[in-house]
Amino acid sequence: MALLSAGQAAGQTSPDLVSRNRLRVCASPADLPFSNKAKQGFENKIAELVAEELQLPLHYFWMPSGPGFVRNTLLSDMCDLVIGYASEADLVDHSNPYYASTYVLVTRKGGKLEGVDHLEDPRLKDAKLGIIAGTPPVDHLMGLGMLDRAKSYSLVVDRRFASPAEDALHDLETGETDAVILWGPIGGYFAQKASPPLIATALHTDKRPPFVFRVAFGMRAGETEWKHKLNDIIRKRQKDIDTILTSYGVPLAPVEAAPIQRAPNDAPRSERSDPQ
């Protein structure tokens, strides 16, 4: 069994077997709106829902998401479930998707760009956009000849110390940029927390890469009984899950409308940096 370094796993011990008497969830300690140690994220709330259905106590193994997250948590038997995982990512097995979301354009309320839902909209022709490097919308901006005037923010960060999405939205509020493109759960959450609130509008495209992606539970391959049990919980509690997601400002797209394909670099909880 692979072990974390002493610095990474201080105070945490490696279990001998997959737990049958508690729900062990792998999560990032500082990754709102997804999760944090104070259990304030929507993935924390969904984990509580799963634990309730299983009638098991909930236990977290905390580790910042990024390169090595899956290898050092789920695949090292430190936990048994990742609550949010891009359903087309290939590092782990997945449940049925329990939501789909899309990239959004975040704008100032009442501004000239409010309501723009396509990057080809002529109102964006001279706009300065904030964009997270390495994400699918970057390809679209490049194809439209709009990337040169965009302001880029880092994708690979440790969210305990940095938050590119919040930095980007601060620049929007101060007028440094005219709008910001973000992954929907992040953009929707921080837009509604801004004062005054910002507007997050779902973006649409019929070109590739798409903007809509599915999210599922992540688990180890070969745990068929566990997978069926999780799928049963999703079916039973889908309305409650949707209520949690919408309360956090997550823009939901029809799961069946999301294309089945490899997930983007910043989709939730893949083997990369924290989603931004």
Image (spheres, rainbow, N blue to C red):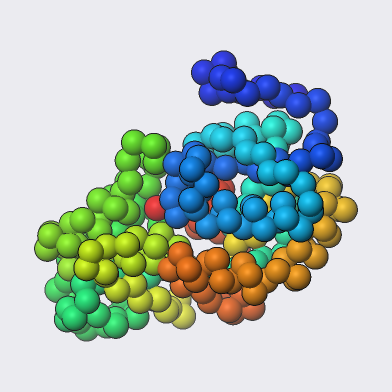
**Does 186 appear above or below 249?**
above
Give whichever of 101, 28 is nearer the camera.
28
Residue projecting furthest to the top: 6
What residue do we see at 71% from left, 24% from top?
Answer: 14
**Quarter the N terminus occupies:** top right
Residue 200, percent from left and from top: 34, 72
- State which quadrant residue 231 falls in: bottom right
In this image, 14 relative to 152: left or right? right
Residue projecting furthest to the left: 175
**Does 190 appear above or below 37?**
below
**Residue 232 is at least partly visible in this image:** yes
What residue do we see at 33% from left, 46% from top?
Answer: 163
* Count of numbered badges drawn on the protein: 0
Residue 59, percent from left and from top: 67, 39
What residue do we see at 21% from left, 56% from top?
Answer: 170
What residue do we see at 67% from left, 71% from top?
Answer: 238
In this image, 15 relative to 49: left or right? right
Give whichever of 28, 248 is nearer the camera.
248
Residue 183, percent from left and from top: 42, 62
**Does 79 appear above or below 189?**
above
Give whichever of 15, 65 is nearer the camera.
15
**Residue 143 is at least partly visible in this image:** no
